[in-house]
Image (spheres, rainbow, N blue to C red):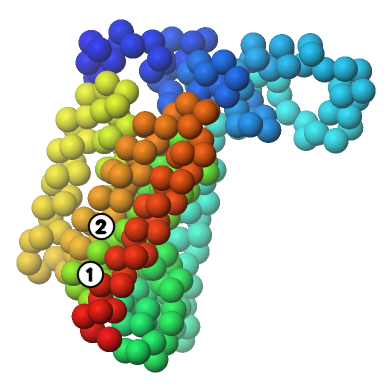
Amino acid sequence: MSTDAFQRNRDNFCYRHPDRQSFVLCQRCLRTICPECQTPAAVGVVCPECLREQQKAQTPAQRTAQRRWSRARVIGRSDSRPLATYSIIGITLFTYLLQMIPGIGQAVERALWFWAPLLYPGISGSFEPWRLFTAALVHSSLWHVGLNMLALFMIGRMLEPMLGRVRFIVLYLLSALGGSVAVALLSFGTPVVGASGAIFGLFGALLIIGRHLGGNVMGIAIVLGINLVIGFIPGYNISWEAHVGGLIVGVLVAYIYTRTRNVTQRAQQIWLVSAVGVGCLLLLLIPAAIYV
């Protein structure tokens, strides 16, 4: 379902396939193109028409060099599979399989889970910052990892083709970071595991991007709200702090993406997204001032 404003705004749809919604622009003509119409180029992706114009402008020497050194590809088509999503799922499931091995499973979990004191040598005697991200790889049960990966599979297949792999990975990692930072701020002594913070970040991003494109996001908002409320129910042993932190960061990064779509705003986008990551790290100074 979508709103009338969404349907009327042709910038939300591929110019070659008017029935296909997309978030990606050709980096030369700035028209919206779907995954089928995207061809990787040095500056990002280009549409078939710009690709043909680019090829016509090449000198014979350039064409020879391209045939000799460029990777083979199908003209007018790029690989639109959500490979980043599949890779994250594969790595996470592999980590869970390691957790199930007797004798080393518990060691793997303890090496990767997030426990805020391990960020502060003055408290724990250790400095292990990788845990801010690796907590998203370990899970407490088969149901835990299964539900998280199912959500990642469903959301990733929608978001990754719209954002591109690099932006999608950055969004996922920063959302995971936001979840860990929120746990450090709000539940300092609690060890946590799971990709829920990153998943909530993807939920928030899908909500913001869908709303920006004019789509009907009510269903996404309801699902997000229900899952958020469940985290506050006593007895479920769910880290609502990670959910809230991941959600906030995911919404913020997605908002930056929607406001810096133009190729001329690429540097601005990189700086703003980097500032979100730096801001999260700076928030870790608060527990240091309180507990160290």
State which mark lies toward you, 1 or 2. Answer: 1
Give the side of residue 22 with respect to residue 151, left or right.
Answer: right
Q: Residue at x 30, y 44 (%)?
A: 252
- Disc 2 element: helix
Q: Is residue 89 above or below residue 131?
A: above
Q: Amino acid at mark 2?
A: Gly
Q: Position of residue 275 (x, y in %)?
A: 40, 52
The 10 Å Cα crowd at callout 1, few under 14, some 14 to 19, many 20 or more, is: some
Front residue of 271/19: it is: 271
Position in image of residue 109 (x %, y %): 40, 77
The secondary structure type at the circle numbered 1 is helix
Q: Quadrant of residue 207?
A: top left
For residue 185, which numbered disc appears in the image? 1
Please tell me how many numbered marks the rendered image carries: 2
- In the image, residue 2 sits, relative to residue 78, either above or below, namely above
Quadrant the N terminus occupies: top left
Q: Quadrant of residue 182?
A: bottom left
Q: Earlier in the sequence, mark 1 or mark 2?
A: 1
Instruction: Give the class, few, some or many, for how many residues have Cα within 10 Å of label 2's Cα (few <14, many ≥20).
Output: many
Please state the horizontal and vertical placement of residue 5, each as a whole percent of the image.
Answer: 25, 12
Residue 13 left/right relative to 225 = right
In the rendered image, the quadrant that contains the C terminus is: bottom left
Name the kind of residue labelled 1 in the image.
Leu
Whether residue 180 is visible, yes or no, is: no
x 39%, y 91%: residue: 125
Tell me the residue at 43%/9% (across/down): 18
Circle 2 sits on which residue? 245
